[in-house]
Image (cartoon, rainbow, N blue to C red):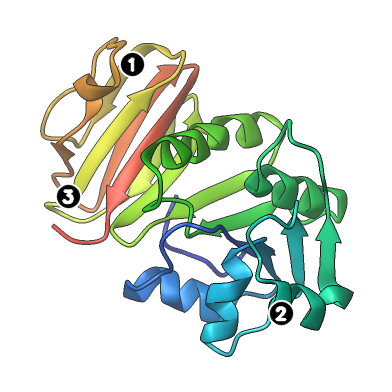
């Protein structure tokens, strides 16, 4: 699995966190076959002269000017039981767009960022293929045994959600059945790929650089 291959992405979601500035997320934004903005993220897109295909949210953070100007593509969802990111995922799922890239979901409030990252596991369980690209690396939810493309010296972290019998090959520090998230962080790829064997769900983070 090559986490940086975006040729098969159906849609890109821009959340209202830190706007992309690194090359990889900017390239994904530019190449998006379908772009959906979460509410206030629209303001940042308009500043860059980019108009999304759809805007979704409860309308609490998009500017009144942009809301009126772009009302034809704005979908108001007042439900407070889900955040705007999940509203965007729900919309795309309903339109059979199941291979997603998420941008701008971190860098704002820390609790929002952590919540957004943890939601990736829920999306995966719904049969959605999703990756979250930040300005430093990519998060991807995984389950079971996986082999991932990498490069020597790439920084790797693994966050366990419910997996058992965790083992690895090709990482500097061998994995084991850890339970606290910090125990799987600050690892490193030894070559151009590594593998993880596990029974259950976990999150992998890969840095863009060594």
Q: Is residue 165 above or below residue 82?
A: above
Residue, disc 2:
65
Q: Measure the alpha-carbon separation of dots 2 and 3.
A: 50 Å
Q: Name the residue under label 3.
A: 191
For the residue labelled by badge 2, is the local secondary structure a helix, a strand or a loop?
A: helix
Give residue 113's quadrant in the image.
Answer: top left
Figure quadrant of the C terminus: bottom left
Q: Where is residue 58 in the image (x, y as percent from the top left)?
A: 75, 51
- Against 84, is 70 above or below? below
Q: In this view, does 104 lie above or below 30?
A: above
- Residue picked out by circle 1: 166
Which residue is depicted at the point 77% across and 69% down? Answer: 54
Q: Earlier in the sequence, mark 2 or mark 3?
A: 2
Residue 83 placement: quadrant: top right
| Cα–Cα gap, marks 3 and 1 | 20 Å
- What is the quadrant of residue 167 in the picture? top left
Image: 83 above or below 175: below
SS type, badge 3: loop
Residue at 48%, 52% (x, y): give it: 105
Q: Earlier along the polypeptide chain: callout 3 or callout 1?
A: 1
Q: Nearer the viewer, residue 3 or 138?
A: 138
Q: Total marks drawn?
A: 3
């Amino acid at each position: 699995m090559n986490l940086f291959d975006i040729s098969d992405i159906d849609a890109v979601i821009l959340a209202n966190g830190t706007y992309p500035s690194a090359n990889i997320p900017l390239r994904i934004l530019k190449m998006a076959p379908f772009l959906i903005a979460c509410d206030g993220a629209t303001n940042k897109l308009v500043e860059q002269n980019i108009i999304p295909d759809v805007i979704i949210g409860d309308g609490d953070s998009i500017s009144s000017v942009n809301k009126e100007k772009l009302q034809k593509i704005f979908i108001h969802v007042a439900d407070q039981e889900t955040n705007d990111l999940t509203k965007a995922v729900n919309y795309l799922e309903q339109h059979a767009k199941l291979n997603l890239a998420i941008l701008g979901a971190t860098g704002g409030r820390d609790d929002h960022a952590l919540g957004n990252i943890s939601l990736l596991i829920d999306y995966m369980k719904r049969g959605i293929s999703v990756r979250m690209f930040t300005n430093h690396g990519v998060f991807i939810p995984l389950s079971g045994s996986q082999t991932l493309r990498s490069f020597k010296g790439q920084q790797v972290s693994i966050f366990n959600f419910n997996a058992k019998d965790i083992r690895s090959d090709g990482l500097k520090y061998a994995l084991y059945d850890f339970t606290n998230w910090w125990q799987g962080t600050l690892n490193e790829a030894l070559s151009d790929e590594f593998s993880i064997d596990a029974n259950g769900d976990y999150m992998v983070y890969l840095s863009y650089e060594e």
